Amino acid sequence: HEQIVYAAAHAGARGRALLPADPETRALVQTWVDCASLVGDDPTRGTELRAGHCVPGLTVLIFAAMVRYIPYRKILFGLLFHPNKQRPLVFATLKARGIHRLPGLAPAMALLARSREHMGGHLDALGAQLSRSGGPWIAGADFTLADVSCVVILDRLAEVDWDEHFWGGGRRPAVAAYWQRLRERPSFALAIES
């Protein structure tokens, strides 16, 4: 989160346009950038505080499917040298059990449930903020770094089919409309769909 704020501040006029000059609006943008970020060594702690921390739990199925392609020697290398030993241990467990036995891993299922519950709360807060600001964006009329940060979260959720659960079928209509506006931006097509 600090890196994208730094990059925007040093990217000329277009980058600075993502960071409002008004202190109150800038603080609002910073709050949403922080909410969408992953902070600390354990990305699965703090799901109640940050939507970014909910994403690993909601995408554990992707990791369970992908880890079969990682050789055990790479996982061992991570165990020896990664500062967070829990991560390579989780990878080793997922690799050994396989995706079909993931539902039998109580900690993984608890993480998924906690992440789903807390992400719902974050998306409720997003919908409320969009209503408060009058939209179309988080801070109102101007597209900011807050929106850049949230598009990453929403895109990841859509990528693993959580969009229907969280904002499909008339649930969270403000978030659904916001997601549609984000996807209609030319920058979305250039950066994500290409």
Image: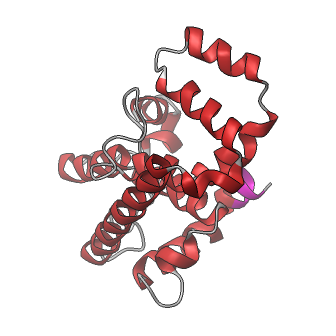
Seen at 56% across and 62% down, the residue is 157
In the displayed structure, 178 sits above or below 168; it is above
Q: Position of residue 42 (x, y in %)?
A: 40, 32
Instruction: Please count the marks in the image.
Output: 0
Q: Is residue 190 left or right of residue 55?
A: right
- Quarter holding the N terminus is top left
Q: Nearer the viewer, residue 136 or 119?
A: 119
Compare residues 6 and 13 and report the one nearer the observer.
6
Q: Is residue 145 left or right of residue 97?
A: left
Farthest left residue in view:
24
Which image quadrant: the C terminus? bottom right
Q: Which residues are magenta?
A: 189-193
The extreme bottom residue here reads 170
Where does residue 121 sit, x and y in percent of width and height? 31, 66
Give the x, y percent position of residue 119.
39, 62
Viewer-closest of 155 and 76: 76
Considering every residue shown, the one lying at the far top of the view is 80
